Image (cartoon, rainbow, N blue to C red):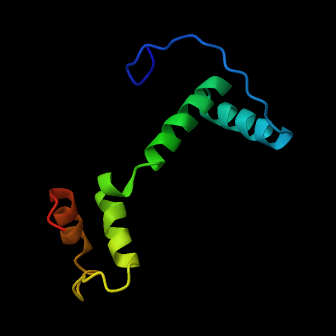
């Protein structure tokens, strides 16, 4: 079992890396004390977390509102952003 609790399927995947990418991979693995494969797995997981669409992330939805001119945010949105994020999470925004 992996640290995430899912059973791993052993399937080899071949990846060609540039020299600088390989150096970074080796450095990260050494610093973390794990295998290169584990660093790649963690990278995939981190990338998947980053690619959350606007509609499912209250923080990103709020940022989108702020970025749109005339979004109708009240003047205190900057100081009360946590309240507005809570409203977004509940679907009130």
Q: In x, y percent, where is residue 41?
A: 56, 29
Left or right of residue 38: residue 21: right
Q: Is residue 68 above or below residue 53?
A: below
Report which quarter residue 19 is drawn in: top right
- Quarter of the picture holding the N terminus: top left
Q: Is residue 50 visible?
A: yes
Q: Nearer the viewer, residue 54 or 43?
A: 54
Left or right of residue 4: residue 75: left
Q: Nearer the viewer, residue 13 or 2?
A: 13
Q: In x, y percent, where is residue 90?
A: 15, 58
- Quarter of the picture holding the C terminus: bottom left
Q: Is residue 35 visible?
A: no
Q: Is residue 24 above or below residue 92?
A: above
What residue sits 73% from the left and 28% below the top?
15
Left or right of residue 37: residue 89: left
The residue lying furthest to the bottom in this view is 75
Q: In x, y percent, where is residue 91?
A: 16, 60
Q: Is residue 17 above or below residue 37?
A: below
């Amino acid at each position: 079992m992996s640290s995430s609790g899912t059973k791993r399927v052993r399937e080899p995947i071949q990846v060609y890396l540039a020299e600088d990418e390989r150096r970074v991979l080796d450095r990260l693995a050494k610093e973390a004390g794990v295998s290169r494969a584990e660093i790649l797995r963690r990278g995939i997981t981190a990338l998947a977390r980053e690619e959350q669409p606007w509609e499912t992330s209250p923080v990103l939805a709020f940022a989108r509102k702020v970025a749109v001119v005339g979004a109708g945010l009240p003047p205190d949105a900057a100081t009360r952003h946590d309240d507005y994020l809570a409203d977004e999470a509940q679907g009130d925004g």
